[in-house]
Amino acid sequence: MVTAEIVIDPAAVVAPIDRRIFGSFVEHLGRCVYDGIYEPTHPTANDDGFRLDVVDLVKELGSTTVRYPGGNFVSGYRWEDGVGPRESRPVRRDLAWHTLETNQVGTDEFARWCALTGSELMLAVNLGTRGIEAALDLLEYTNHPSGTALSDQRIANGSVEPHNVRMWCLGNEMDGPWQTGYMTADDYGKLAARTAQAMKAADKTLELVVCGSSGSNMATFGDWERTVLEHSYEHVDFISCHAYYQEYGGDLGSFLASSLDMQYFIETVVSTADHVGNKLRSAKKIKLSFDEWNIWYLEEHQQSDEISDEWLVAPRQLEDVYSVADAVVLGNLLITLLKNHDRVASASLAQLVNVIAPIRTEPGGAAWRQTTFFPFSVTSRLARGEVIAPRIHVDTYSTKRHGDAPLVDSVATVDRDAGTAAVFLVNRSQTESIEVTIDLSGLAMSTVTEAVSLHDDDVYARNTADDQNRVGLVDLEGAELSDGRLTVTLPPVSWSAVALA
Ligand code: AHR
């Protein structure tokens, strides 16, 4: 049997866990909002029209911050359309997804939905078709307590307390030619700096995210970050990263090693940001907000006719049905985010419901968990305290897209106050079980409290509307702790978690 050795040294602390690493994303896109979180005629809907069965699944998923309302959608959005009496809200065309937006859900309703789910609202402002004034107005509307035109308008609309939004995205993917109003790095950097400066004049405690690259494959990758930060460094706190992965042409080996690209992406953005900061002799370090990451079969969607010439309300768009392999990759991407948590301080799984999402719904019907739900929910629940970077000794295999990839990847967390720890592991081998010995003698744990795995003999098994529970967590057999050494046997193409106390 293939074997691997892992050493977990409690001194190898990456960072204390900031719960924002388990954020997600709700965009006005397809059926994410309408017929997703919001369906007023559904039997479980509350007075706002939100489905409470979906609320329960979001809580179980354990997502923390929720980025809203886009995505590409935000670059044409007029936030004023989504507040006030619902019956007088305008219907508008959304050019990003070629649909009709009814504005029945807007900022106040979404803030209430966040409160229902226990999530923190993270907003994006429109720097595509709009600019500084609209951003400042939205900030006044959401965050000013009372006694100004826009805060009093919010109060009159029923939100007496300010929403107190802390994290703000300065536009979305402004490097992408598909973005409404996309710009050069120079133009965007100047606009982002001026917008940030104005927003911080209103509230210097805001945390502002400037747009980084839409992917590590963008021709401007690296140069974009450098130029944008040269303009905005002292005014912003985060730079965004977006990355989506998929299996191309049956090349499962490369797909299972997707996190190597995420690692390259993070290292490149960190070194570019630090280059700018050092050049400016700044004492500040820019953090990364990985505010879109997931598996997305983008090419298949581009070849479909789901972006219709007609103007439809909430059509089915980007409704990927995820396999076991997809879930294993997603679990591995989350391991990578945790391993880089000293710089990746915030992240958003894109997206939350129906649209490339861990949760699916049918109108009037059920809500269920996709395969990708499981590694996210277990990691969010068990990862507590501090992240520890393990030393991993294991063979590699060769991939077409990412070079040599280790067969096993892993990260650990330890909560010294609670006396608990967790280890998250991925086996990328398509054929071999791997026996892993983990030296965690420095953690002083005495028992395994939980050991679960996401694995199936059919790596393409999925949960569907007709078979919603086909794939779920299974027990990770034979996890044993003795004399500070944990042994586990990881099945091929699997993600696993072991909790200890
Ligand atoms: O999440 C789907 C889309 O992906 C978002 O709207 C956009 O920001 C990205 O290209």
Image (spheres, rainbow, N blue to C red):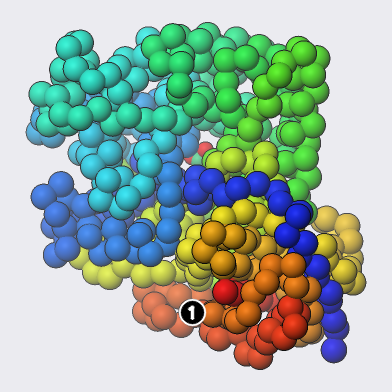
Q: Which residue is mark 1?
A: 472
Q: Nearer the viewer, residue 417 or 420?
A: 417
Q: Which residue is depicted at the point 66% across and 27% down?
A: 286
Q: Nearer the viewer, residue 40 or 436?
A: 436
Q: Position of residue 46 (x, y in %)?
A: 14, 54
- Name above or below for residue 180 compared with residue 117: above
Label 1: how many Cα within 10 Å (few below 14, some 14–19, many 20+): many
In the image, is 402 to the left or to the right of 96?
A: right
Q: Could you tell me which quadrant the N terminus lies in?
A: bottom right
Residue type for callout 1: Gly
Q: Quadrant of residue 385?
A: bottom right
The residue lying at 87 percent from left, 71 percent from top is 394
Residue drawn at point x = 39 percent, y = 77 percent: 468
Relative image position of residue 397 (x, y in whole percent) = 88, 69
| SS under mark 1 | loop
Whether residue 31 is visible here, answered yes or no, is yes
Name the image quarter holding residue 440: bottom right
Does 142 appear above or below 390? Answer: above
Q: Is residue 256 visible?
A: no
Q: Nearer the viewer, residue 36 or 44?
A: 44
**Whole-percent x and y of residue 423?**
65, 69
Percent x, y of residue 292: 55, 44
Which image quarter is the C terminus in?
bottom right
Against 405, residue 18 (above or below) is above
- State the residue at coordinates (32%, 29%): 164
Is the shortest distance between ligand 1 and the CB of mark 1 under 8 Å?
no
Label total for image: 1
Left or right position of 111 against 327: left
Q: Is residue 456 above or below residue 66?
A: below
Position of residue 42 in the picture relative to residue 297 (left or right): left
